[in-house]
Each structure stands twice: as structure tokens, then as C-alpha cells.
């Protein structure tokens, strides 16, 4: 069955679905009604881990649904502008919005001296953007410090003075930002006017991978763009990773946007807290894609015993990981002449090949300079679970999460990068430990053959007679003070080398 032509066609269809490009028409399988929600005239933030379908949702809406609903969809990939400083990243964002308005592309207006206000603003914004290098030199505060030196050369006294000038780049950046603030009402009026003159009823600004913008400036960017579109027929749709995103900052005044007040939330994540939820969700996605190639009841036909459940667990409930492991598991089964069904062994070996390396690569790409310290915390959790406690699950005290909120945020970021998974957000602990706890499991790609290491797999998806998860309450407590020590003592070892060394020692 696994080497059937329809199965091969299904693998090809799935692999093609991974290639998301702004000018393509990706296949988005809307089993949760997210397209309808995205199409509402609301300011929204779409949360989802890598591989949850954020980009696919936005691009599909832009190239398919929006076109049929008289919606002007402006897709902006922050990956293209993530290295820019502030406020240049904001200027570039404004340019992409204005240059996507249809009338801004009417070049004949320039020659007839009939430019729209949007076209004039584009010209001014480009000048403002390009002023960086020249103004950095011209608008600097000079501080002179003379260094005198000299000596006697052939009976003559020689001396020299040198003057240093130090530029104030921060003041220059503030000047640019002041200009943007002064013209915000003008920008707002101009884009409103051009939209009303167009054939479109509304405009959706689809801001993808927002978490790639420098975290400390995210509230500033959102605050400005939200003020720009508020009260207009422009609607901001921001796709991002939850714990790599700062929506709001409280200073003397509030900067940013507030969930459920300024923007509504769309959550694409399905975690392992309730295994039935991601199992049903991912099963519907797989069945839909299978029907596209003429395969029915794929769950019953291609999976043996509990292997579908094993696939859901191995994927952490993430659609792209689920589909990647699935197609690789088929190849793995065929390579060992197992043509009938996918077994748990096929799933785990396929997950191992997909594994933590790709997740670490994504972490380093997205987190940049903070990645090494975040990995230090992750390595310490691995040491705690696999070397010291020999259990795949660990607990974190909710009281400690409040006390050490910065370290707890790192735990949540590791969850967003799928290196650990939450299995119970609120539980008690055995052995007389007081308080409430959060329960996490290591990603299953880290212990594909755990029996060889003598590690106890905590089967959190199973329940005892008291409806409590088996083994979760008995899991050891990982203290966030320990995470802080690991964070501050980055030894520079590559995580892959550490895992390899750990495997050899077990």
C-alpha cells in the first residue's frame, strides 16, 4: 500500500505545500474557520509556532480569497527588513504599504505634474530613508579633544594637534522619528483618500513573521501602524510567534497594542495538553490532502495500531512537522521493505531524521545574538532530565515563574521553538511539594530510542483511574534559579555536540 502511486502523489502534494511564496497560490486547508476570521474587518494578531500555517494562511488569503472580496491585500515579509534599525524599519514598512496602493504605480502622473499625495509621501519617505549616511556626518555634535605631541627633528621643534568629533546617532534617529510623527495625520489622510478612489472596499495589511523585528522596538512599530490605520478601512493582520513578541510597553504612556482591546487574537497552535485536539485537527488536514489524490480513509489504511497517535506526539501538534515526519516515515518504511502500514518505528526514525537539528537551526536564525544563552538553558534542561533525573518530563513551579519571569519567558520561548512542549499548564506535584506547577516534556526527537538509555518516558497522554496524567505529578521540579545560572554561564558548547556526547556516555 505504501508504494501505491496515489501515496506517492500524496507525498508530492505535501512537499509542494511547504513552499510558501508571496506570488504563489499555496493550498490552505481551513479546518478551523481561520479564513473567515481573517476576512473580518478587525485588527488582528495571529499567533502560531513555526510550521503552524501562519504564512500559508496570509498568502492564501492574499492571492485567493481577498481577490474575490474586493479586498486590497498588502503582504509584507519582515524577513526582508528585520536587519534595519529603528525607525528605518518603520519607514520601509510605510513605503511598502504606500507603494502597494494602485494609484501610486501610475507613473504618468509624474510627467503631468499631477502626483497624488501618496506618491509625494513616497518620494519624501525615500529621501528620509536614504538620509542615514549623509546626516550621520552632517548632524553630529562635535566634541574637540586635542592631542599635542612632537619632538626635535634636526634642531627644529615639530608638533601636531588632532581633533576628534563624535556623532550623536541617537539624536539623529529621534529627528527622523519626529518627522514621521509630524506627518502621520498626512499619511493617514492620503491613504484613506486613495483607497476610496480605488475599486477596493478595504485594505488588509498582512504583516508576516513580525517576531523577526527587534523585540524592544516591536511595540513602537505596532503603535505607529495601529494609529495610522485606526478608524479607517485599513486593517492590520500581524502573524507572529507568541513568546518572541512584545505587543505593548508601559512607560509614562502606553506604547503598542493591547490584546482583546486594540486587536483580537487568532491562535493557530494546538499543543499536547489535550492530545485529542491536535489528533483530530491534524487528521482532518491529512484526510483532506489525501482526498485530493483520490485516497480515502488514509488514517485507517496507512497507519498500524497506534502509529497515528505516535505521529501526533512526535510532531508536537505542529502541522508542518506532522506532514514532514509523515512523508519521511513512508520513505523510511519502503527503504526497509515494509510496504503495508506505517509503524511506530517508522514514525520515530523519520522524526529522528527531522529532529532537533532543524529546530536549533530555526532558533539561531530567528533569535540571533540571544540564541547562545537560550541554548545554554536548553542544554541545562537536557542535563537535568536525561543525565540526572532520567525522565522525559519536568515541572516548573508557578510561584517561581512569577518570581523569575525573565527565565520563565525563556522556557516559553523554547516551547515556541518546539524543543520542549507543555503537557499540563496547571497541576499539583507528588511527594508533598506545595503549590501549583506547569508540566513540560522534552521534544520526542531527543530520545528516539530511550530504552537504551534507561530513561523513563512519561506517557502524559495516558490517565489513571483518578483522571490524572500518568507520571506527570511525579516528575522532578526544574528550578528557574538554575536556569539563571545556565543563562549567565554560557560555555559556548554547540548543543548538537553536547547531545552527541551525552548519547555516547549513556
Image: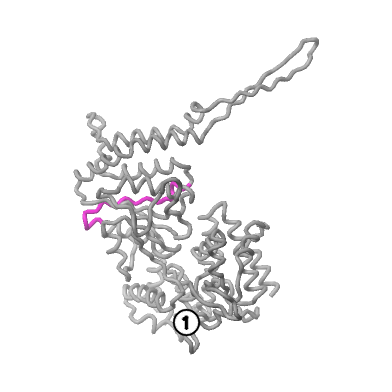
* Residue beneath disc 1: 307
In terms of image quadrants, where is residue 53? bottom left
Label 1: how many Cα within 10 Å (few below 14, some 14–19, many 20+): many
In terms of image quadrants, where is residue 197? top left
The image shows residue 132, relative to residue 408, as above or below, that is above
Tell me where residue 98 appears, x and y as whole percent.
Answer: 31, 42
Tell me where residue 329 appears, x and y as whole percent.
Answer: 48, 75
Q: Which residue is at a point 44% across and 41% down the rendered structure image?
A: 87
Tell me where residue 377 appears, x and y as whole percent.
Answer: 61, 62
- The answer to whether residue 76 is magenta is yes
In terms of image quadrants, where is residue 372? bottom right
Secondary structure of residue under mark 1: helix
Q: Which residue is at a point 30% across and 45% down the rendered structure image?
A: 100
Viewer-nearest residue: 149 or 317: 149
Say how many tags the image has: 1
Viewer-nearest residue: 234 or 286: 234
Viewer-nearest residue: 390 or 72: 390
The quadrant of the image that shows the N terminus is bottom left
Task: Return the residue found at the far right.
Answer: 155
Colouring rule applied to residues? one colour
Q: From this viewpoint, is residue 140 visible?
A: yes
Q: Which residues are magenta?
A: 66-82
Q: From this viewpoint, is residue 449 visible?
A: no
Tell me where residue 21 appears, x and y as whole percent.
Answer: 38, 56
Judge left or right: residue 203 versus residue 225: left
Q: Which residue is at a point 48% across and 89% down the rendered structure image?
A: 465
Q: Which residue is at a point 65% across and 64% down the rendered structure image?
A: 497
- The answer to whether residue 146 is magenta is no
Viewer-nearest residue: 326 or 4: 326
Amino acid at each position: 500500500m505504501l508504494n501505491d502511486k496515489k501515496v506517492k502523489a500524496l507525498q508530492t502534494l505535501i512537499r509542494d505545500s511547504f513552499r510558501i511564496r508571496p506570488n504563489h497560490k499555496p493550498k490552505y486547508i481551513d479546518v478551523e474557520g481561520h479564513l473567515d476570521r481573517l476576512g473580518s474587518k478587525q485588527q488582528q494578531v495571529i499567533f502560531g509556532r513555526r510550521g503552524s500555517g501562519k504564512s500559508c494562511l496570509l498568502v492564501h488569503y492574499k492571492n485567493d480569497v481577498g481577490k474575490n472580496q474586493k479586498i486590497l491585500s498588502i503582504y509584507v515579509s519582515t524577513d526582508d527588513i528585520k536587519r534595519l534599525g529603528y525607525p528605518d524599519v518603520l519607514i520601509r514598512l510605510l513605503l511598502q504599504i504606500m507603494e502597494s496602493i494602485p494609484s501610486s504605480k501610475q507613473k504618468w502622473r509624474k510627467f503631468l505634474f499631477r502626483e497624488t499625495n501618496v506618491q509625494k509621501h513616497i518620494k519624501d519617505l525615500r529621501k528620509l530613508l536614504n538620509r542615514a549616511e549623509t546626516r550621520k556626518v552632517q548632524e553630529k555634535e562635535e566634541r574637540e579633544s586635542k592631542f599635542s605631541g612632537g619632538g626635535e627633528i634636526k634642531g627644529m621643534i615639530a608638533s601636531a594637534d588632532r581633533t576628534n568629533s563624535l556623532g550623536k546617532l541617537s539624536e539623529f534617529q529621534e529627528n527622523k522619528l519626529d518627522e514621521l510623527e509630524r506627518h502621520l495625520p498626512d499619511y493617514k489622510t492620503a491613504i484613506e483618500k486613495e483607497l476610496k478612489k480605488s475599486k477596493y472596499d478595504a485594505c488588509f495589511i498582512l504583516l508576516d513573521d513580525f517576531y523577526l523585528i527587534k523585540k524592544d522596538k516591536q511595540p513602537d512599530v505596532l503603535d505607529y501602524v495601529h494609529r495610522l490605520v485606526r478608524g479607517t478601512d485599513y486593517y492590520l493582520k500581524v502573524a507572529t510567534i507568541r513568546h518572541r513578541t512584545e505587543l505593548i510597553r508601559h512607560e509614562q504612556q502606553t506604547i503598542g497594542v493591547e490584546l482583546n482591546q486594540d486587536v483580537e487574537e487568532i491562535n493557530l497552535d494546538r499543543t499536547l495538553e489535550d492530545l485529542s485536539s491536535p489528533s483530530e485537527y491534524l487528521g482532518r488536514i491529512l484526510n483532506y490532502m489525501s482526498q485530493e489524490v483520490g485516497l480515502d480513509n488514509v488514517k485507517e489504511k496507512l497507519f498500524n495500531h497506534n502509529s497515528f497517535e505516535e505521529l501526533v506526539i512526535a510532531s508536537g501538534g505542529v502541522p508542518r512537522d506532522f506532514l514532514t515526519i509523515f512523508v519521511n516515515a513512508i520513505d523510511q518504511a519502503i527503504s526497509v521493505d515494509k510496504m503495508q502500514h506505517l509503524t511506530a518505528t517508522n514514525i520515530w526514525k523519520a522524526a529522528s531524521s527531522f529532529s532537533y537539528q532543524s529546530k536549533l537551526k530555526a532558533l539561531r536564525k530567528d533569535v540571533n545574538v540571544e540564541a547562545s544563552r537560550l541554548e545554554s538553558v536548553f542544554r541545562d534542561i537536557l542535563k537535568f532530565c536525561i543525565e540526572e533525573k532520567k525522565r522525559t518530563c519536568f515541572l516548573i513551579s508557578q510561584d517561581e515563574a512569577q518570581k523569575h519571569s525573565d527565565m520563565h519567558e525563556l522556557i516559553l520561548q523554547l516551547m515556541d521553538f518546539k524543543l520542549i512542549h507543555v503537557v499540563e499548564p496547571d497541576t499539583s506535584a507528588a511527594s508533598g511539594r506545595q503549590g501549583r506547577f506547569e508540566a513540560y516534556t522534552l521534544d520526542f526527537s531527543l530520545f528516539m530510542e530511550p530504552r537504551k538509555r534507561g530513561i523513563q518516558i512519561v506517557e502524559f497522554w495516558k490517565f489513571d483511574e483518578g483522571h490524572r496524567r500518568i507520571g506527570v505529578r511525579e516528575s522532578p521540579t526544574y528550578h528557574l534559579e538554575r536556569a539563571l545560572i545556565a543563562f549567565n554561564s554560557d560555555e559556548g558548547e554547540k548543543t548538537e555536540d553536547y547531545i552527541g556526547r551525552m548519547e555516547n556516555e549513556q
